[in-house]
DNA sequence: CACGAAGTGGGACGACCGACCCACTTCATA
DNA sequence: TATGAAGTGGGTCGGTCGTCCCACTTCGTG
């Protein structure tokens, strides 16, 4: 009801859409569900956003930046004393993120799947994963620099391994909710990465 | 138009639904789209299946059995002369399967996501992955037995690593379509597995 | 041949979807 | 205080959804 600028309304709708996506999934992310969550009238939506798809595009593009980059990179340099601790800690932090808010990661998967199916959005999915890989590579480089070691395999390749494992780990945990199995999976992943680490 | 039994009609509808799912995605898998693909009338659907969801459940339950188990296990024992060749070959075969029919694997992901969102279906998703893990464990046991070696880590854990990696590999390839990067990812995964192999 | 079961299909239902129109209110500016 | 831009919301459009009803045809069996 209160009056506000278009940009402010866009932000409120955006936030509401993310909440609906995480809570109820992409299939339930209708225009009406979004405005209900934001407590707005239906017409207000098309005043702020041209189409429903435009909001989706914006969500995909935006949530990537602050998402995994923060989840992985931001937590890798805690109080780790060894490369193993750093890698293992970062992966564990990520799992904790998934456990704390499963709907969020599930929503990311749904958005990716959705984007892959629409020709106009497939480039977005590609960008999404390119950024994931870049963030993971940054984390690996950071570890190498901090502990004065080198990776014997290009970090770009190892980054793909990391992202593939976080995806697989997420899917495994979402389907089984098995914390212990996930922890063992993280240890195995850490082993796999450390095998390509050598003193420099 | 031709007359047929309920079971036969169910099979035709099932096959048609799978085709639509692989070609157009889960979002397009409506009752009408299915009967159009099967060239039936709309009413025929509810004569064969009680509800639309029932068909979904059947698809999830059925496609698992003949899917990844055949994709992985069936191709692991080709002309491989070493454990490395066996593992690497199986993973490469799987990637080839994804490349040959991306829509199929994408459909599987969509079904999993869908199942995870409905409380009545989450158990199905859990079963799905339990079977995946079992199939992968079987493959690993088979390799160990054939080459007279042993895994230094429970194959159940390594199986989770394999499935997580195939999921991550699939997602990575679907989003980037980068064959070379996928091949390097497979090599890294093979390395990770072989690190836990020892003579017996 | 009769008859009931099995199978078929046109049409309609209520609900929800994205999008949009247009009358209305509020505000900034002149 | 007049005026036009900015913002708001009720209502509706055409379309698709899953489901269902019911008249119809075909078939196996008596």
Image (spheres, coloured by chain):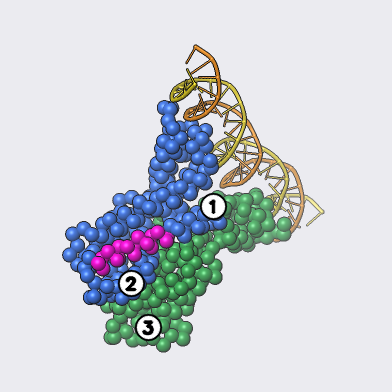
Chain colours: A green, B blue, C orange, D yellow
Crowd tier of the residue under label 1, counting other residues whose Cα lies within 10 Å: few below 14, some 14–19, many 20 or above: few
Query: N-terminal of the two: label 1 or label 2?
Result: 1
Q: Which is the main secondary structure of the residues drawn in magenta? A: helix
- Range of the magenta residues? B129-145
- Disc 1 secondary structure class: helix
A156 or A12, which lies in front? Answer: A156
The residue that appears at 57% across and 53% down in the rendered structure is: A28
Q: Which mark identifies residue B110?
A: none
User: For this rendering, which residue is in front, B69 or A183?
Assistant: B69
Marks 3 and 1 belong to one chain: yes
Give the number of marks.
3
Q: Quadrant of residue D22?
A: top right
Q: Which chain does the residue under circle 2 lie in?
A: A
Question: Residue at the location (48% across, 76% down)?
Answer: A93
Circles 3 and 1: CB atoms closer than 8 Å? no
Q: Which residue is mark 1?
A: A27
- Badge 3 or badge 2: first in the primary sequence: 3
Neighbours of disc 3 within 10 Å: few (<14), some (14-19), many (20+): many
Q: Secondary structure at mark 2?
A: helix
Residue under pointer 3: A83
Residue underneath mark 2: A158
Quarter of the rendering occupied by the N terminus of chain B: top left
**Percent coordinates x, y for residue B191 in the rendering:** 27, 71
**Residue B185 painted magenta:** no
Q: Earlier in the sequence, mark 3 or mark 1?
A: 1
Q: Is residue A66 left or right of residue B139?
A: right
Marks 3 and 1, how far apart in space?
Answer: 41 Å
Q: Is residue B44 left or right of residue B138?
A: right
Q: Is residue A177 above or below residue A77?
A: above
List x then y, in percent, for residue B186. Answer: 29, 65
């Amino acid at each position: 009801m209160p009056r506000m600028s278009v940009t402010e309304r866009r932000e409120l709708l955006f936030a509401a859409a993310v909440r609906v996506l995480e809570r109820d999934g992409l299939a339930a992310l209708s225009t009406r569900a979004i405005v209900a969550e934001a407590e707005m009238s239906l017409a207000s939506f098309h005043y702020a956003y041209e189409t429903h798809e435009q909001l989706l595009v914006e969500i995909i593009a935006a949530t990537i930046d602050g998402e995994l980059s923060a989840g992985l990179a931001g937590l890798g340099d805690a109080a780790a004393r060894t490369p193993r601790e750093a890698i293992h800690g970062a992966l564990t932090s990520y799992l904790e993120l998934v456990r704390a808010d499963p709907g969020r990661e599930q929503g990311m998967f749904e958005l990716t799947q959705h984007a892959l199916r629409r020709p106009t959005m497939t480039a977005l999915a590609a960008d999404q994963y390119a950024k994931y890989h870049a963030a993971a590579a940054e984390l690996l480089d950071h570890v190498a620099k901090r502990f004065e070691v080198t990776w014997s395999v290009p970090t770009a390749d190892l980054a793909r391994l990391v992202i593939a494992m976080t995806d697989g780990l997420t899917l495994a945990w979402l389907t089984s909710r098995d914390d212990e199995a996930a922890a063992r999976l993280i240890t195995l992943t850490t082993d796999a990465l450390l095998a390509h680490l050598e003193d420099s």
